[in-house]
Amino acid sequence: MSSFLIVLDVILGVILLTMLGFWAYTRIQSKRLGGSLTNEEFRAGMHKAQIIDVREADSFKREHIDGARNIPYTMFKYQFKELRPDLPVYLYSDSLTMTLRCANILHKNDFSKVFYLKDGYSQWDGRKKSSKN
């Protein structure tokens, strides 16, 4: 029974270290890539920025932040060249991982003002636009 507990402790330790590593990686990436914005900060700067929704097209068509353009994550590495590198870019989606990956693509291509919505689209409390089907 004691060997079982040792194995269980090791497994739990590995899981904890993995989670801690992912958290640390996300924090480091977010600081390196520009930074997160609260709803208030996002709203305050959005009139001077390029607002990009990186969710898939069907989610964007259903509802999105008013004034946003859709460049889906799956197409981002091909379409990011449509963006102006001299203007701030505000990214958002439902997934922080997807958003940070897009921010990383921009960062590697000399975009210096890249920011993202901290709590993601699901927590956005500002103006939204939805399609009328």
Image (tube, rainbow, N blue to C red):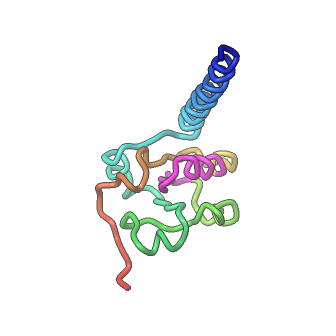
- What residue range appears in magenta? 86-105
In which quadrant is the C terminus drawn? bottom left
Q: Relative to 121, is 71 above or below?
A: below
Relative image position of residue 38 (x, y in whole percent):
36, 43
- Residue 122 lies left or right of residue 81; in this view the side is left
Which of the two residues, 111 or 22, is positioned nearer the viewer here?
A: 22
Which of the two residues, 90 or 17, is positioned nearer the viewer here?
A: 17
Q: Relative to 64, is 37 above or below?
A: above
Relative image position of residue 63 (x, y in whole percent):
39, 70
Residue depicted at 65% across the width and 17% down the height = 1
Residue depicted at 61% across the width and 49% down the height = 111
Which of the two residues, 3 or 92, is positioned nearer the viewer here?
A: 3
Relative image position of residue 100 (x, y in whole percent):
58, 46
Which of the two residues, 58 or 68, is positioned nearer the viewer here?
A: 58
- Name the quadrant containing residue 128: bottom left
- Residue 34 lies left or right of residue 123; in this view the side is right
Residue found at the very far bottom of the displayed protein: 133
